[in-house]
Image (cartoon, rainbow, N blue to C red):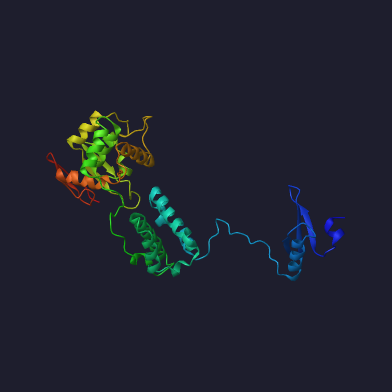
Amino acid sequence: MNEVSLKFRLKYVAEDTDRHGNVRLYYRRHSRKVRLRGPAGSPEFLADYKKAAAGTLEGPKKEQGAGHVVPCSIRWLCVQYYKSAMFKELDPRTQKVRRAILERFCQHKSDGDKPFALLLPRHVRIRRDEMSDRPEAANGMVKALRQLYRFALRYDLHDDNPAEKVEYLKGNPDGFHSWRLDEIARFEEVHPVETQAWLALALAIYTGQRRSDLFQFGRQHVRDGWLVFTQHKGRNRNPVRMEIPIIAELQRIIDQTPTGDLAYLVTAFNRPFTSNGFGNRFRKWCDAAGLKECSVHGLLKAAAVRLAELGCTDVNGGLKTCQCGGVKAGHLA
C-alpha cells in the first residue's frame, strides 16, 4: 500500500511518478485536479489538502502562449494588417522593418493587448516623446502607426487614425547624417581610384540613387550612355522608370575599376552584393576612413549638391532635368 493510503487514507488524493522517478501528489475530485506540495504528510501537504478540499486551492496559472492574440487588440489589428494586400505589396525589406517597429510598440508595457479602438493621439504623442533622443526611430514609429490605422480605415475596422494627428519630430527627416565635403574627401583619400569603395561612392554621388538601386547597377542598365532602370523602392505599387546620364567623371571611374559582369559592385568572391551585404560593406569602408557617422544613406543630400553643381535639378523628383556636357535627361514618375 502506498504512503498516502497507508498513513493518511485521505479522500481524493492521487499520485503518479514522473519520468525522473519523482512522486507527484494531486487532489482529484470529479474533473478537477490540483497539484499538492509534497512530501506526503508534510505541513505543506496538509495545508494544500485542506485548501483543495475547501475549493480554495488553485493550480498554477497557465501562461499565454507566444502566439496568443487578444481579439480587437492592437496586436490583433497588426495581424490583420500583415495579411492584407496593403502590407504584402510593400517591398520585403520595408515589410521587415515595419513589422519590427510595430512589434516593439506592442511589447512596450503590453500595449499590444490593449483595444486598438482606444488608442488616442495623446498616447502616440507620449510614446513619441519618450523616444525624442532618437528622432528617426520616433518618427518611424509614428509612420508605422499611421499606416496601420490607414489599413483599419480602408477596411472599415475603425473610423479614425490617431497617429495622423501626431506630428513628426523635427530634425533630419531620414535620420541619417549628411556627408560634408571634407568627409567625402577623406573617404576618397583612404579608398583611391580602382577600388570598389571609390566606385560605390561615385555611383551614389553621380546618380543620387538609394542603396537598393546602387548595388544592382550593371552594364545591362546602360543605353547609349544612360543608366535606364526602374527604381527598386515602390516598384510593385508605383514603379518609377529612371533615365540618368552617365557623366564623364562617373564613366571614367567605372572604366578604371574592376567590376562584375552584371553588377559593377561585387564581393571579394566576384559575386553581386545583396542589399544588406552592400550596406554592411559600405559601413566597413566608412569605418576604415574614420567616418563613424557616415553611411550610404547619408550620401543622397551630398549627391544633390554635387549634381546641382553640374547643372542637375530635382534629382529625386518626378521630372529630372540635367545639363551635363550638353546632355539632357528626363523621366516621368
Q: Please, is residue 262 above or below residue 276 in the view? A: above
12, 319: nearer the viewer: 12
Locate residue 271, reporting x and y percent. Answer: 37, 32
Left or right of 126 on screen, residue 170: left
Q: Please, is residue 123 above or below residue 332 in the view? A: below
- Asked whether residue 80 is in view, the answer is no
Locate residue 127, reporting x and y percent. Answer: 40, 62
- Asked whether residue 225 is in view, the answer is yes
Q: Quadrant of the N terminus?
A: bottom right
Left or right of 185 on screen, residue 129: right
Q: Please, is residue 218 above or below residue 164 in the view? A: above
Left or right of 219 on screen, residue 126: right
308, 17: nearer the viewer: 17
Q: Residue furthest left?
A: 326
- For the image shown, how many numbered marks are present on the structure? 0
> Which of the 4 image quadrants contains residue 186?
top left
Q: Please, is residue 110 above or below residue 185 in the view? A: below
Locate residue 66, reporting x and y percent. Answer: 55, 55
Q: Residue furthest front?
A: 43
Left or right of 174 on screen, residue 49: right
Locate residue 282, reporting x and y percent. Answer: 33, 39
